[in-house]
Amino acid sequence: MTRVLYVYREYHVAPNQDADAEPVTHCMECVACEQASSTAEDVDGPLNWVFNHLKSYPTHLAYREHLTRPYRAEPRTYP
Ligand SMILES: [Zn+2]
């Protein structure tokens, strides 16, 4: 007869701020035509892409930001 033991653990999930965590990245996408900027660790490059896109397509006024933030699950510890 085989017995199985299940152990349930609780976890805490939060942004990963470890030194080796993946970076937070930003990308801007035009809602009208779905063209998108490159992905960057700061938002300045993607925002500059929006201004350049507006020069070529002055009627494209809506954009969405895609932000990628790494998270990490840590098992809860009890005293
Ligand atoms: Zn566009």
Image: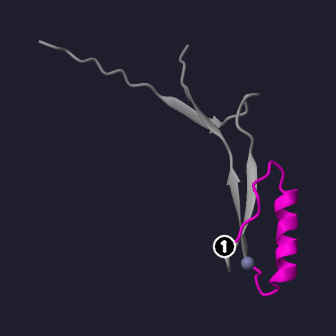
Give yes or no for residue 21 being in the magenta stretch: no
Task: State the residue at coordinates (67%, 75%).
Answer: 31
Q: In which quarter of the image is residue 24?
A: top right
Task: State the residue at coordinates (36%, 21%).
Answer: 7
Q: Seen in the image, is 65 located left or right of residue 1? A: right
Category of crowding for the residue at label 1, using alpha-carbon neighbours closer than 10 angstroms: few (below 14), some (14–19), many (at least 20): few
Quadrant assignment for the C terminus:
top right
Q: Seen in the image, is 14 located left or right of residue 27? A: left
The one nearer the camera, 71 or 37, is 37
Q: Name the residue under label 1.
A: 34
Task: State the residue at coordinates (88%, 58%).
Answer: 44
Tell me: residue 24, above or below residue 35.
above
Task: State the residue at coordinates (58%, 36%).
Answer: 13
Image coords of residue 56 (percent x, y): 84, 81
- As drawn, the residue found furthest toward the left would be 1
Give yes or no for residue 44 being in the magenta stretch: yes
The one nearer the camera, 49 or 78, is 49
- As drawn, the residue found furthest toward the bottom would be 59
Image coords of residue 10 (percent x, y): 47, 28
The one nearer the camera, 62 or 54, is 54
Tell me: residue 15, above or below residue 49.
above
Q: Is the CB atom of the residue marked by disc 1 within 8 angstroms of ligand 1's nearest atom?
A: yes
Quadrant containing ligand 1 reads: bottom right
Q: Which range of residues does the magenta coloring cover?
A: 34-61
Image coords of residue 2 (percent x, y): 16, 14
Amino acid type at mark 1: Glu
Q: Quadrant of residue 65?
A: bottom right
Quadrant assignment for the N terminus:
top left
Tell me: residue 31, above or below residue 43.
below
Q: Seen in the image, is 72 located left or right of residue 28? A: left
The one nearer the camera, 79 or 33, is 33
Image coords of residue 68 (percent x, y): 68, 50
